[in-house]
Image (tube, helix red, strand yellow):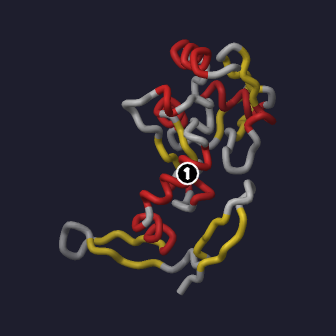
């Protein structure tokens, strides 16, 4: 059985992670004899999903962690708690793999982990391990990538769509 290991995140907040990655539990599906296998970590997330979403939103300051749009710009649409590394690529429901994403960034990113920059495969910005200001600069509502990672992310996530640029101009001092 996995124990909880407590530590501090990169921002100094207390976090808990379950050590046992390989423990699996079979849960019944809707049809007799069918079921899905869930890791203990996924079970924890399912039981604590509302709490996890709240923590992700607080950590992000209610802003998209990719394009920096404010949730307050979209009062009728909730931003998505997104997997940085999609589950189909082995990503987990661990708080260290979740970020807050506006609907545009989430749609354009999809399960992608990388993009091409001048023919070179380049990984995308990871809000959990990278610093936004190391890869991007915002000028008059437009986001400019200042590294290959930033350039790949700006391009793939279509961050400078005219509607998004205008929203950033209206809601930030960039």
**46 to 108, vertically: above or below:** below
Give the residue displayed 56% in from the left and 62% down from the top: 94
Give the residue displayed 61% in from the left and 30% down from the top: 67
Q: Is residue 113 left or right of residue 23?
A: right
Q: Residue furthest bottom?
A: 1
- Please tell me how many numbered marks the rendered image carries: 1
- Residue 8 rendering spot, x and y as whole percentages: 72, 65
- Residue 134 rendering spot, x and y as whole percentages: 81, 36
- Residue 54 rendering spot, x and y as whole percentages: 49, 53
Q: Quadrant of residue 120?
A: top right
Q: Secondary structure at mark 1?
A: helix
What residue does disc 1 label? 56
Residue in front for this viewpoint, 115 or 49: 49
Q: Quadrant of residue 91?
A: bottom right
Q: Quadrant of residue 17?
A: bottom right
Q: Neighbour class for label 1 at 10 Å: few (<14), some, many (≥20)?
A: many
**24 to 71, vertically: above or below:** below
Residue in front for this viewpoint, 57 or 1: 57
**4 to 125, vertically: above or below:** below
Residue in front for this viewpoint, 51 or 24: 51
- Which image quadrant: the C terminus? top right
Give the residue displayed 47% in from the left and 42% down from the top: 80
- Residue 77 rendering spot, x and y as whole percentages: 39, 33
**173 to 115, vertically: above or below:** above
Give the residue displayed 57% in from the left and 36% down from the top: 64
């Amino acid at each position: 059985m996995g124990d909880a290991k407590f530590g501090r995140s990169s921002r100094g907040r207390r976090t808990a992670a379950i050590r046992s990655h390989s423990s699996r539990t079979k849960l019944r599906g809707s049809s007799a004899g069918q079921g899905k296998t869930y890791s203990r970590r996924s079970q924890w997330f399912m039981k604590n999903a509302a709490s996890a979403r709240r923590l992700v939103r607080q950590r992000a300051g209610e802003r998209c962690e990719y394009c920096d749009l404010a949730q307050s710009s979209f009062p009728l649409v909730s931003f998505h708690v997104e997997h940085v590394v999609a589950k189909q690529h082995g990503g987990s429901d661990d708080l260290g793999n979740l970020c807050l994403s506006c609907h545009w960034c989430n749609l354009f990113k999809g399960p992608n982990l990388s993009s091409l920059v001048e023919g070179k495969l380049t990984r995308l910005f990871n809000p959990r391990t990278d610093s936004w200001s190391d890869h991007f600069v915002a000028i008059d509502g437009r986001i400019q990538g200042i590294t290959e990672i930033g350039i790949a992310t700006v391009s793939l996530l279509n961050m400078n769509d005219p509607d998004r640029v205008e929203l950033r101009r209206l809601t930030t001092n960039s």
